[in-house]
Image: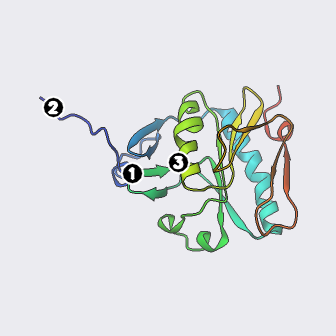
Amino acid sequence: MGMAAPTYYTADMVRALPQDGNRYETVHGELFVTRAPRYAHQYVISELVGRLHPYLRRHEVGQVLTSPADISWAPDVLVQPDVFVVPVEEARTLDWSRIQTLLLAIEVLSPSTQRSDRFTKRRVYQESRVPWYWILDIDGRVGEIWTPEATFPAIERERLVWHPQGATEPLVIALADILPRV
């Protein structure tokens, strides 16, 4: 008889998994495995970073990064947001283990990630007090905006607005500018 696979994964167990092209995450011990994303997913990520980067150069409140990443708040939590912003002080450490604060987390939905992005990962971002969590639904052409206290998301069909503490003006992103043309 073979050994049963573990049903409760720690961040260290996930880090030890093979580098096989899949993305591995764990939230409260639940393992999430996703394949390489579709082209539209990567297109949206590129467009987001292209808007966040110059904004954060003007307003030095954080650094924009993309997955793969190792964001961990507990022994049984390791997430890889598609796009995220961390405070400048934490980014300068150049050490994943010292990145504990996300100012903004963004997930771009894929068919294989909808459940984890909308429920499991959303809850861990709320528990970790991430002030802004955006879920971008390419097919639905909407953004869902979550805050730590929200029971339901604010649905945005036109634009995303982010005004982090310390910035003199908000970042405004028109959804039509970052979603693939239909």
Quadrant location, the N terminus: top left
Q: What amino acid does circle 3 point to?
A: Val
Residue assigned mark 1: 76
Label 3 residue SS: helix
Crowd rating for badge 1 (residues with CA inside 10 Å; few <14, some 14–19, many 20+): many
> In the image, residue 126 lies at what x, y percent?
59, 49
Which residue is found at the position 36% from the left and 45% from the top?
Answer: 18
Amino acid on which the number 1 mark rests in the picture: Asp
What is the CA distance from the residue labelled 3 to the residue labelled 1?
A: 11 Å
- Between tags 2 and 1, which lies in front? 1
Question: Residue sitting at 62 percent across and 32 percent down?
Answer: 38
Q: Position of residue 15 (x, y in %)?
A: 39, 52
Q: Residue furthest left?
A: 1
Q: Earlier in the sequence, mark 2 or mark 3?
A: 2
Residue labelled with disc 3: 124
Say above or below: 166 vs 102: below
Rate crowding at label 2 as few (under 14), some (14 to 19) or many (20 or more) other CA atoms within 10 Å.
Answer: few
Distance between mark 2 and mark 3 Cα atoms: 33 Å
Q: For the residue marked with disc 2, what is the amino acid?
A: Gly
Residue pointed to by mark 2? 2
Residue 108, label in figure: none
